[in-house]
Image: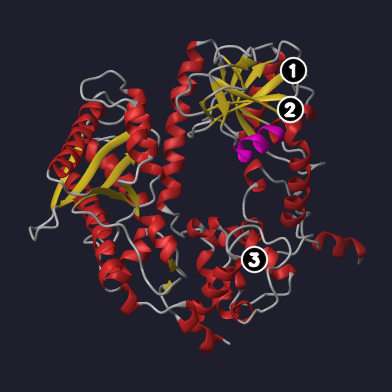
Amino acid sequence: MSSRVEDERPPALPPVTIDAGSLTRCRHRLYLDTAYGSLLRGVKEDAGVVQRREAAAAHREVIRDEMAGLGAVIVPADTSRNARIEATLAACRSGASIVWGAVFAEDDVDGRRGRCDMLMADPAGGYAPVLVVNHKVTDPGAGALTSPLGAWDPRPDATRKVRSQLRDQLALVHAHRLLAVVGLAGASDLGGVIGFGADCMLVHDLAAVAGEYDERFGDRLAVAQGRALTVPSRVGECRSCRWWTDCSAQLEAAHDVSLVAPGGRADALRAAGIRTVDELAQWTGGVPENWPHGDFAEAVVLARAWLTKVPLVRKRAEVTVTRADVEVDVDMESYQEHGAYMWGTLLDRRDGTVPEYRAFLTWEPVPTLDEARSFAEFWGWLMGRRADAHDAGQTFAAYCYSRSAEDKWLLDSARRFDGMPGVPTEAEIREFIDGPEWVDMYIAVSENFVCPSGKGLKKVAPVAGFTWRDSEAGGEASMGWYREAVGYDGDSDHSQRTRLLEYNEDDVQATRALRVWMAERAVEDIPTADDLRGPAA
């Protein structure tokens, strides 16, 4: 009898292990992926996630080929996992100076699994883990520790400062721990990251984040093993998560407070006993302890707006926005970190004539020197319209929406193409963007309104009555259109070029429409916070 019962027991489940990506992933998503991942078969992955992964893979292929030329041992990617594990160990034990595509055996004792883009022999002994990522890891400055690509030789760098990425650092510690299990961890406790541009390796001191790693690893392993309870809570990651449909339904049914105060703000509110949007809307107890950032009073208004389904709330009686005799709306289009391929403009002379759209662009795949031409033409045209206005005794303003991207590519383009015909100096760019004639409409919206659904242009402009011609218009979608437009994956598709131009024109038209509406009708259309106070109380 006992023998038969034992034979009927289900086979033992394999130990639960987690990879480095789990350390920065939403805790509830990790639980769902581990327990119910099979339910996602056939669920379409977010297009932006796919594009970023494909771009990162393409970047790694370029670096792999460069490392192969430097004598790296390449672990074949088209073999079984066990074969790659054995090949990794064999390469390291043979004394290879560079090992590409390392794969480690699962550490069933501590619960780790993973791989590493590259291992580099540390002269002090063992191997240093190296990641290859498709984002920038340094900025101009000083204080970084870097190493050349071909050999592990970390030294202080007087030309670069660290652009910190906790995700990269935690992943390096994870790989270092897996190396330690097989006795191959570098003696210096350092790890490297090759970022976009790939002109050096940024070197991190792994001891600096070891404590953070241990805390996160213990927590995430407990989640994956079902020893720690998780519940849905809205965070930034939700926008691209395939579980969001299920989670959002639960959150909305519960009026969960994270719907209006996501991330760490929701944690602080729950610690204060505020768990629902309704409770936040009626809160009179002052700012909760450990409130992380942002105006708490605005969070209360957001809760009231969410309950009453109001798209915007005025912060004050009057709505103010900068206007000028001559106005130019600007919207830049870039492809990842490769370059800015389009500078779209909308000129409104405020004289009753129809505003004029004009784009300055290159269809050569970025990065390309042809960017210098289109950028110089854009800058010359913009400064020409500014000078014309000043000569006529008129005021001038140029507008963008959320200036960080435009500022970045204005400055980067000036640096990259310094000295080329028509390209302004970095000082000229700074003089303009630091002055009063460069106006960020995102800031204007933030100063005038509380925005329950977000402050993005696609969220706010429809309140002003503007609609985009393309229902799929958006930054992530445009990345795919661009690849087809310039032929990254085959022949160029000119219909996608038209699509990008229309999308860019709609963006500048939306910025202008929002500004006109703010100046003329917003006071009548949008209630104030005081208007909402009575019904919500």
Residue 126 circle label? 1
Find residue 345 and report its horizontal and vertical position in percent: 20, 46
Q: Is residue 358 above or below residue 159?
A: below
Q: Which residue is mark 3?
A: 266
Q: Residues within 10 Å of mark 2 (few under 14, many from 20)?
A: many
Q: Is residue 318 above or below residue 219?
A: below
Q: CA distance from mark 1 to mark 2?
A: 9 Å
Q: Residues within 10 Å of mark 1 (few under 14, many from 20)?
A: many
Q: CA distance from mark 3 to mark 2?
A: 38 Å
Q: Amino acid at mark 3?
A: Ala
Q: Amino acid at mark 1?
A: Gly
Q: Which residue is mark 2?
A: 179
Are the residues tagged 1 and 2 within 8 Å (C-beta)? yes
Q: Quadrant of the C terminus?
A: bottom right
Find residue 77 and report its horizontal and vertical position in percent: 53, 29
Q: Earlier in the sequence, mark 3 or mark 2?
A: 2
